[in-house]
Amino acid sequence: MILYRPVGLKEYLLIKESGFTEFPPRLPEQPIFYPVTNQDYAEEIASMWNTKDEVSGYIGIVLRFEVDDGYIGKYDKKVVGNSRHEEYWIPAEELDEFNDHITGKIEAVRVFYGEDFDEGQLDNLRELSDI
């Protein structure tokens, strides 16, 4: 199954460190990892939330990745707004297992820059320049 994840700069750099193969552990205040089921919803979060968030570095990056269908099927799909706001809730303590079921690489498919984004960060994001 193809899934999407909107992320900010810090999370993106940690994913990059992994060779684009896994998501980093959740912070203590983040008990759930929530990949979303469609690019439109991921873009909505990345553009409307991450670009306005200092912790995200005022950048929203939409990631696409594939997870083994049999594995993701053990989780219920949640609808958290209108019908296109679908996501899976993966408990933080199960993220390592989730990462083990990612097939291929995690790839960036869309980037949004907020007004307060520091363009000096672009050196860390060279691979995003074509998106």
Image: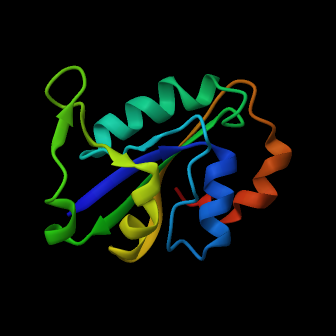
Left or right of 71, for residue 15: right
**Residue at (20% x, 68% y) in the render:** 71
Quadrant where the N terminus sits is bottom left
Estimate the x, y position of residue 12 in percent, counting from the top left: 61, 55
Left or right of 123, for residue 65: left
Tell me: residue 25, above or below residue 45: below
Estimate the x, y position of residue 54 in percent, counting from the top left: 72, 27
Question: Which image quarter: residue 58?
Answer: top right
Estimate the x, y position of residue 63 in percent, counting from the top left: 44, 55
**Residue at (25% x, 61% y) in the render:** 2
Left or right of 10, for residue 62: left
Tell me: residue 101, above or below residue 62: below
Q: How is the image coloured?
A: rainbow
Front-lying residue, 96 or 82: 96
Front-lying residue, 10 or 130: 10
**Residue at (38% x, 48% y) in the render:** 91
Tell me: residue 90, above or below residue 31: below
Q: Is residue 35 visible?
A: no
**Residue at (63% x, 22% y) in the render:** 52
Question: Which image quarter: residue 16?
Answer: bottom right
Q: Is residue 59 visible?
A: yes
Estimate the x, y position of residue 119 in percent, counting from the top left: 80, 42
